[in-house]
Image (spheres, rainbow, N blue to C red):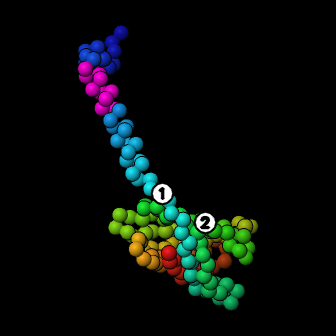
């Protein structure tokens, strides 16, 4: 029976070098993973929106605080609307350049209406960051809002 790996012909020194190399590689990946997972920072962002284009009188402009978790590479948030219990979830990426793309999804408690959020902007670690964008219904009533998020 022929062996697939020439373990005996490599000799013990080469086998030890392979094992040592594998240990060093895994140790380096562990250090890399630790360096890339900094402590998360809890922030309160301000969501400011114009009136909904589908019915401005029924859905006027508003501003509300939304809790977010911020790391050096990501931004996540979630809120339940106070008026109807609808849920919204936000997820975004922060590029090395500081550019942020934040998207979100929302849905009504009865499932009849769904909407999408999209924001973009620049992260300012020493001041106020402003993301411009808005919300657009994807099912249910027709309409949209222009909005911004600041933190």
Residue drawn at x 49%, y 68% is: 102
* Residue 47 picture location, percent across and down: 56, 78
* Residue 31 picture location, percent across and down: 38, 45
* Residue 93 picture location, percent across and down: 45, 63
Say which mark, if any, is on residue 138.
none
> How would you rate the neighbour count of disc 2 (Cα within 10 Å): few for under 14, some for 14-19, many for 20 or more?
some
Q: Which residue is mark 2?
A: 78
- The answer to whether residue 3 is magenta is no
Locate the N terminus and report the quarter of the image it occupies.
top left
Instruction: State the image quarter where residue 27 is shown.
Output: top left
Per the image, label 1 sits on a secondary structure element best described as loop
Residue drawn at x 43%, y 61% is: 73
Q: Which residue is mark 1?
A: 39
Q: Which range of residues does the magenta coloring cover?
A: 13-22
Q: Nearer the viewer, residue 111 or 124?
A: 124
- The answer to whether residue 14 is magenta is yes
Q: Nearer the viewer, residue 65 or 89?
A: 65
* Residue 120 picture location, percent across and down: 45, 73
- Marks 2 and 1 sit apart, C-alpha to C-alpha, by 19 Å
- Tag 2 near tag 1, CB within 8 Å: no
Residue drawn at x 56%, y 77% is: 46
Q: Nearer the viewer, residue 77 or 55?
A: 77
Which circle's residue, 2 or 1, is located before the other in the chain?
A: 1
The answer to whether residue 86 is visible is: yes
Residue drawn at x 45%, y 78% is: 128
């Amino acid at each position: 029976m022929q062996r697939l790996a020439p373990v005996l012909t490599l000799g013990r020194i080469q086998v030890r070098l392979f094992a040592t190399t594998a240990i060093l590689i895994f140790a380096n990946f562990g250090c890399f993973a630790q360096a890339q997972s900094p402590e998360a920072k809890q922030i309160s962002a301000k969501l400011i929106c114009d009136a909904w284009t589908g019915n401005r009188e029924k859905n006027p402009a508003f501003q509300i605080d939304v809790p977010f978790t911020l790391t050096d590479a990501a931004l996540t948030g979630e809120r339940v609307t106070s008026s109807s219990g609808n849920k919204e979830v936000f997820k975004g990426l922060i590029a090395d350049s500081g550019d942020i793309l934040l998207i979100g999804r929302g849905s009504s408690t009865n499932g009849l209406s769904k909407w999408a959020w999209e924001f973009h902007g620049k992260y300012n670690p020493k001041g106020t960051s402003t993301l411009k964008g808005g919300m657009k219904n994807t099912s249910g009533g027709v309409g949209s809002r222009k909005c911004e998020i600041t933190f």
